[in-house]
């Protein structure tokens, strides 16, 4: 076939890149498509880490990131930058992922230009406008603009149906993060960083920590870090490994509370490959991340979620994930219980993966192919 459908994937942050990489790679395997990649680079170094790992070279790079950027900065720069790229390239479809401000701005830009939008990881909801902020509204708005919805689970599909989305436009595919995870976690992985390679995972128990949510910045994070200090003082076999997000507002409080604390290793964000393999070897994860709530159940590592709400109820139902918020006593008590009570720990430490079998990208691309072929034949 000589005519190819031009599908442009648009993303901007680390988690979008990780979860879109399997789709971008799969699109390249199908001669039906002319795949293009546009990055807003809402994240810079954290995005480039992922692009390098998966050998993805963007066709267009808007390079919008600025230190301490506001939501207004990201939305306006992404919208205007995407206008030029979309005007010039006129793709047949754009693919966006999840719930970042890049996601919403890209869907809006495509809508303004009458370009169809397919939304990967569609239908996640907390039903709380400000939690997570601004992601809940980003994904709702993106859902309103999208023509095709790739829901990772039946629950996500039901959320969309409840909002009146046409059932023929929703496809349950599993989450592409499981595809990425399966490509990346290896039994005998060697860490290039000697600080990680030298950890004796038999002698020490490792808590892996990540934090970045906008609604947690400031005092909530401080409370969490105080709980970590208490845990370190309570258990002398404990190591905390904390790859610190590049957001300066996170970094400042981390350094104030945890800088120089014995057995707390503060490091830069890790490449996805060592990070995923470190997750697999950790005893416990404390995080406010969305993606980690999907990855950890597949690895059987208990997660305490430093948030009051989650859009990932499947992970809670699977038993691997518990919501604990950011209150210092609550965080300490929940972790303390898991570190002292083997029965409670084992209840959570089971591999139960509700997010798919690692074939989500293949399903997504095959659905797109069917749709395009039927359009071409009509
Ligand atoms: C963004 C997304 C959030 C997603 C998260 C994943 C929005 C509004 N937020 O939040 O949904 O869960 O990414 O991590 O879309 N920075 C760097 N280098 C980088 C990345 C960030 O220096 O590679 C710093 C910059 O100072 C930047 C700040 O971090 O201004 C915050 O980045 P931003 O994308 O606005 O917010 P995140 O908290 O990363
Ligand atoms: N991650 C990574 N390196 C790190 C921390 C996280 O590669 O140092 C990965 C993690 O495995 C997951 C994704 O980044 O796939 C989650 O990103 P983040 O927590 O920033 O965003 P969220 O998922 O909350 O949107």
Image (spheres, rainbow, N blue to C red):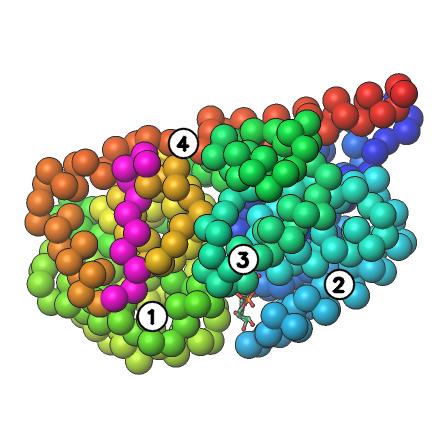
Residue 160 image offset from top left, x and y in percent: 58, 39
CB contact under 8 Å: marks 3 and 2: no
Mark 1–mark 2 Cα distance, whole angstroms, equals 31 Å
Q: Would you say 70 lies left or right of 132 here? A: right
Q: Residues within 10 Å of mark 4 (few under 14, many from 20)?
A: many
What SS does tag 1 mark?
helix
Q: Which residue is mark 4?
A: 354
Mark nearer the viewer, 3 or 2: 3
What SS does tag 4 mark?
loop
The image quadrant of residue 320 is top left
Q: Which of the two discs, 1 and 3, labels the residue nearer the N terminus?
A: 3
Q: Residues within 10 Å of mark 2 (few under 14, many from 20)?
A: many
What SS does tag 3 mark?
helix
Instruction: State the mark number for residue 79.
Output: 2
Mark 4–mark 1 Cα distance, whole angstroms, equals 29 Å
Q: Which residue is mark 3?
A: 135
Mark 2–mark 4 Cα distance, whole angstroms, equals 34 Å
Q: Which of the two discs, 1 and 2, labels the residue nearer the N terminus?
A: 2
Q: Establish whether ligand 1 lies closer than 8 Å to the Cβ of label 1.
A: no
């Amino acid at each position: 076939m000589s005519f190819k459908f031009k599908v442009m994937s648009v993303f901007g942050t680390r988690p979008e890149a990780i979860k879109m990489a399997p789709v971008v790679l799969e699109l390249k395997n199908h001669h039906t498509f002319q795949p293009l990649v546009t990055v807003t680079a809402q994240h810079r170094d954290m995005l480039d880490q992922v692009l390098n790992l998966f050998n993805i070279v963007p066709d267009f790079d808007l390079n919008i990131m600025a230190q301490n950027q506001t939501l207004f900065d990201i939305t306006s720069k992404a919208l205007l930058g995407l206008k030029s790229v979309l005007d010039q390239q006129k793709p047949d479809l754009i693919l966006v992922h999840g719930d970042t401000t890049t996601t919403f701005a890209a869907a809006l830009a495509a809508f303004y230009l009458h370009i169809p939008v397919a939304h990967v990881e569609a239908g996640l909801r907390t039903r709380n406008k400000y939690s997570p902020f601004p992601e809940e509204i980003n994904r709702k708005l993106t859902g309103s603009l999208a023509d095709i919805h790739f829901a990772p689970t039946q629950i996500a599909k039901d959320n969309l149906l409840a909002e009146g989305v046409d059932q023929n436009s929703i496809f349950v595919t599993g989450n592409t993060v499981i595809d990425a995870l399966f490509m990346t976690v290896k039994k005998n992985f060697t860490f290039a960083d000697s600080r990680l390679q030298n950890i004796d995972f038999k002698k020490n128990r490792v808590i892996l920590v990540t934090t970045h949510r906008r609604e947690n910045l400031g005092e909530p994070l401080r409370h969490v870090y105080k709980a970590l200090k208490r845990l370190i003082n309570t258990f002398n076999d404990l190591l905390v490994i904390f790859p610190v997000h590049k957001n300066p507002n996170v970094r400042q409080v981390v350094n104030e509370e945890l800088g120089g604390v014995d057995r707390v290793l503060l490091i830069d964000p890790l490449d996805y490959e060592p990070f995923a393999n470190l997750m697999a070897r950790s005893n416990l994860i404390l995080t406010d991340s969305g993606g980690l709530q999907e990855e950890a159940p597949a690895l059987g590592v208990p997660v305490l979620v430093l948030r009051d709400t989650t859009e990932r109820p499947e992970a809670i139902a699977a038993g691997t994930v518990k919501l604990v918020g950011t209150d210092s006593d609550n965080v300490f008590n929940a972790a303390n219980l898991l570190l002292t009570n083997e029965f409670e720990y084992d209840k959570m430490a089971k591999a139960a993966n509700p997010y798919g079998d690692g074939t989500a990208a293949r399903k997504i691309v095959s659905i797109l192919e069917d749709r395009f072929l039927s359009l071409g034949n009509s």
